[in-house]
Image (cartoon, coloured by chain):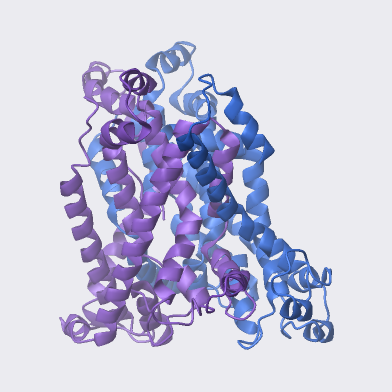
Chain colours: A purple, B blue
Amino acid sequence: MTIASSSPPSRLPLGGAEGARTKPRTDRARAGEGRGDGRLAAVFIAPALLGFLVFLLWPTLRGVYLSFTRYNLLTPPEWVGLDNYVRMVHDPIFWNSLEVTVEYVLINIGVQTVAALAIAVLLQRLTRSALLRGIVLTPYLMANVVAGIVWLWILDTQLGIGNEIISGLGLERVPFLADDTWAIPTIALINVWRHVGYTALLLFAGLQAIPGDMYEAAKVDGASEWRMFWRITMPLLRPVLAVVLIMTVIGSFQVFDTVAVTTAGGPANATNVLQYYIYGAAFGRFQFGYASAMSVALLVVLSAITFVQYRLTRAGQTDLG
Amino acid sequence: MAAVATTTTVRPTRRRPSFGRIAAWTAMVAIVLITLLPFYWILRTALSTNNALAAHPGDPLPVDLTTGGFERALGLQSTEEAIAQGGAGGGLTFWRYLINSVVVATLITVCQIFFSAMAAYAFARLRWRGRDKTFGLFLAGLMVPAIFTLLPNFVLIKQLGLVDTLLGISLPTMFMTPFAVFFLRQFFMNVPREVEEAALLDGAGKIRIFFRVMLPMASTPVLTLGVLTYITAWNDYFWPLMVSYSDSSRVLTVALAIFRAQTPQTGYDWSGLMAATLVAALPMVVLFGIFARRIVSSISFTGIK
């Protein structure tokens, strides 16, 4: 979950981008004095480059290669061409996984974005309290596994406090994680609980970059908070919001831990999200080739979504200028 | 909530509380409650016995107060006692997993930040051929989702014979993440040239400048990145689950999931589970508590991910 933003949510990185543009000239001017840098740079870059090549670039290429093979870890990979992809296209459970994952992402991202935006704006417009910002971040300190277990308990049909309250209100108890219609929305909301504070802080960082006197001026003109939100906050926050959205969508597609610990893909594949299915194919049935092919499919889906999102929201541009 | 209430009155623009402001504060209070109440519920459950929980599921206070759950979670209880209190036969050799988690998270954090800082400095302040192309390659690495490299990385770790070792868990993220390099480079580029030039005039070499000038100047971003990396490494589940098979390399997240799976589906050992989740989450809460102020403002101002 460390897919980063290249955006400049605040003044600091903006200055960096500015600096980058003017730097090459001074670099060249100083080229004489920096002649000895090459060898030192090689030493400085070596460990990171090694890690990059061995654990990022090579696995990426290898993953694509493995997707064209039959491979069970015990015997060498055997080239089978497009077999895995053909199988994937005809695999109803794969399509079900994709569908379930998309449902999860839509609910998770939809609720999380609106809630995070609300929290960020409340933090900006109501108070300067660092304590409140800290509190909002606390669920982020928990592992997904821990959060999953905790909500499994709170939402337990018989003994959970959630269902105690529901039945106290005179309503039917809800088998949140055991029912095929409720399970995915429930898992999506559990993860909203854990991540919303972090997303809110990222958006809050973007809000900090909006000059306060714009609100003051609007207030003098008699604008309401509601109007200021739509006319000032939203347009100026859009680039940051777009980048945060791309990041969270990519993270959201990789849901695994919470599913593994709460429903294990059940009931009847209702929560068998793509990453869980891939894990099962690889480590349950040792079909590494097939699992790799599904990973490639996931990569293609993510790239496409990122590209479309980027174009739609014109993430690179800012309204500030 | 008292502390929250006082902060409002400090606001410079003091106005009569409008309907909108009251509604906004109500929403804020609701958010805080939703955020924090589960934590209280964990504590309340952990301090109860399973039998009493079944009899009084909605009681707001701990029922039949006991530390049995914690004893079970820490592996201090005998099997007979545990079963009598509604636990599973299998305990949690908690200290073992705790040490494993600490070793893995520390190894990843220290190495990753250090190596990434070195690379970031080379990208930001040293001049060498192919620098921008190499950096572009690193940036492209940001686009590759974690899941994609997991299977091939597992195959690699297996071929290196490092499955079921702490090193095997740590290795893939020990050297760098594209983000750490990117983030620290961004910082180093903003350090004024004059600082470096002054040190150069004093006869310091570039290596010395990096260790004695640049790295200390970057203490706040390094700290923020470090704590977030530590939390991420501590909370990671998928990769350690793939790589570790036995107690020798099992980290807390994986152990917790196994502990959960051990308790019978018909009657979970809720008090034991909640005690275990609490002790598993506690180190991060303490860590965060120590650095909270600097980290929160650092995230708020730089938009670090």
Looking at the image, residue B244 sits to the left or right of residue A282; the answer is right
Q: Is residue B12 above or below residue A207?
A: above
Say how many tags the image has.
0
Q: Is residue A193 above or below residue A176?
A: above
Q: Observer-nearest residue: A181 or A171?
A: A171
The quadrant where residue A213 appears: top left
Looking at the image, residue A144 sits to the left or right of residue A277; the answer is right
The quadrant where residue B145 appears: bottom left
Q: Is residue B115 visible?
A: yes
Looking at the image, residue A24 sits to the left or right of residue A132; the answer is left
Q: Quadrant of the C terminus of chain A?
A: top left
Residue B36 position, x and y percent, is 61, 53
Q: Observer-nearest residue: B106 or A284?
A: A284
Residue A248 position, x and y percent, is 35, 54
Q: Is residue A130 above or below residue B243?
A: above
Looking at the image, residue A270 sits to the left or right of residue B222; the answer is left
Residue at the spot 50% in from the left edge and 46% down from the top edge: B27
Residue A54 position, x and y percent, is 36, 59
Residue at the spot 68% in from the left edge and 75% down from the top edge: B270
